Amino acid sequence: MKITFMGAGSTVFARNVIGDCMCAESLRDSVFALYDIDAKRLEESRTILEAMRVSKGGYGKIECYVGTENRKAALKNANFVVNAIQVGLYDPATIIDFEVPKKYGLRQTIGDTLGIGGIMRALRTIPVLQDFADDMAEACPDALFLNYTNPMAMLTGFMLRYTPIKTVGLCHSVQVCSRDLLTKLGMEDKIEGRKELIAGINHMAWLLQIRDKNGEDLYPAIKSRVDAYTAKPDANDRVRMDYIKNLGYYCTESSEHNAEYNMFYIKSKYPEMIEKYNIPLDEYPRRCVNQIEGWKKEYAQILETGVKEHERSNEYASRIMEAVVTGNAYQIGGNVLNTGNLIENLPADACVEVPCLVNGYGVHPCRVGRLPVQCAAMNMTNVNVQLLTIEAAVTRKKEHIYQAAMLDPHTGSELNIDDIKAMVDDLIAAHGDYLPAYH
């Protein structure tokens, strides 16, 4: 068994996913191939994972591969490939994604999934994924590609539509969506044994049904508590609570993300809404700086005191691998192509997030049917941008980048077309060699 981790310099995430594999009896004796283009970051990951491997009983083997010239060797005969790359990193790419739009008066919170930041991140990343797919087609054509990199729907949709690689996109938010909602609203007693149905698109999949262990619909009680929760000065989930009030349903990803996925909350004409909805502008750059500094301190402490004991996390990756290897079925919320009308009122070439059964034959998406019309409409405002961005990446036509930005709900509600085009041109120039040539 060989498990290859692309972007293994993302040490904290590599530690979680590979540490989870080391906790699974069916996976722990694998070869763990770590790949990155940054030798220093890769060595940090190797140091920590090797210490974890020894502490877990010494099973398996860790191999390291640095640089694109060794990528194919890292992928050779892999059974599973985990993707967690960030093309351009925080500095310079994320800084550019935030600072250039600011000059045009366009503000963002996270900028990794939708909006102009998500568009540019996809355009940087898709050419690299094409290289991965080409190498995998030769080195490990039957491997399952587990994509964790954002923008999830754009990247996973590209892989599924334009490469032969078996791919599923995985997020962190589906697993904790309903649990966190019930906890926020003081309904912790309803968590155990709850049943739920979640479907839509990544970061905007809808909690369509939630029932307690006795089958009672919990939405009436949830809706009755929303106002009391949002009245709290420190309430940090006001956008999603507003979704419940105005759309009828809660969604998977955080309010700081969803604040920029629509035309409602970040508006220069209504600056008071930033405070009203507790929207953290420039949140992702802040997180990046804090994470970089935090990791330096944590790594120094690990070298001094040793690796902490790892307990299996709620990430899907190791559970998927285990289900495929053992044949014991497991259910996930996965990002897949909307083939066969999984969600009837979204396009066939959209990347959707739906319940999926995983077993020895791979990942099997479940058909959901129709979303409530208002939920499908919200999703479509995002799907439009996703499909146009993929089109831009495939055709290398700049006009499709313009169109993706024009149709982005937040960008289009703040800027006129001339400014949108000028901003896109400035972003392309600023990113330089991180982007291919567009015509």
Image (cartoon, rainbow, N blue to C red):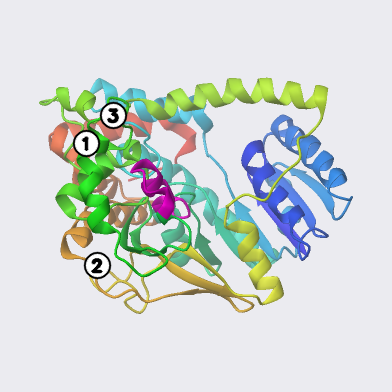
Q: Residue at x 62, y 54 (%)?
A: 82
Q: Which residue is mark 3?
A: 279
For label 1, the SS is helix
- Closer to the observer: label 1 or label 3? 3
Marks 1 and 3, how far apart at CA? 27 Å
**Mark 1 nearby-residue class (10 Å; few <14, some 14–19, many ≥20):** some
Is residue 260 visible in this depiction of the protein? Answer: no
Mark 2 belongs to which amino acid?
Answer: Leu
Going by the image, does 222 lie left or right of 361? Answer: left
Which residue is drawn at the image coordinates 26% and 31% (left, top)?
423
256 is higher (above) or lower (below) than 75? above
Residue 421 found in image quarter: top left
User: Closest to the observer: 429 or 45?
Assistant: 45
Q: Which residue is mark 2?
A: 371
Determine which residue is flagged by label 1. Answer: 421
- Left or right: residue 86 versus residue 417 is right
Q: CA distance from mark 1 to mark 2?
A: 34 Å
Q: Position of residue 35 (x, y in %)?
A: 70, 46
Nearer to us in this view, 193 or 135: 193
Task: Say which quarter of the image contains residue 255.
Answer: top left
45 within the magenta span: no
User: Residue 38 at what x, y percent from top left?
Assistant: 68, 34
In the visual, does 210 lie left or right of 74? left
Quadrant (top left/top right/bottom left/bottom right) for the N terminus: bottom right
| Earlier sequence position, callout 1 versus callout 2 | 2
Magenta residue span: 174-189
Q: Which element type, helix, strand or loop, lies under badge 2?
A: loop
**Which mark is in front, 1 or 2?**
2
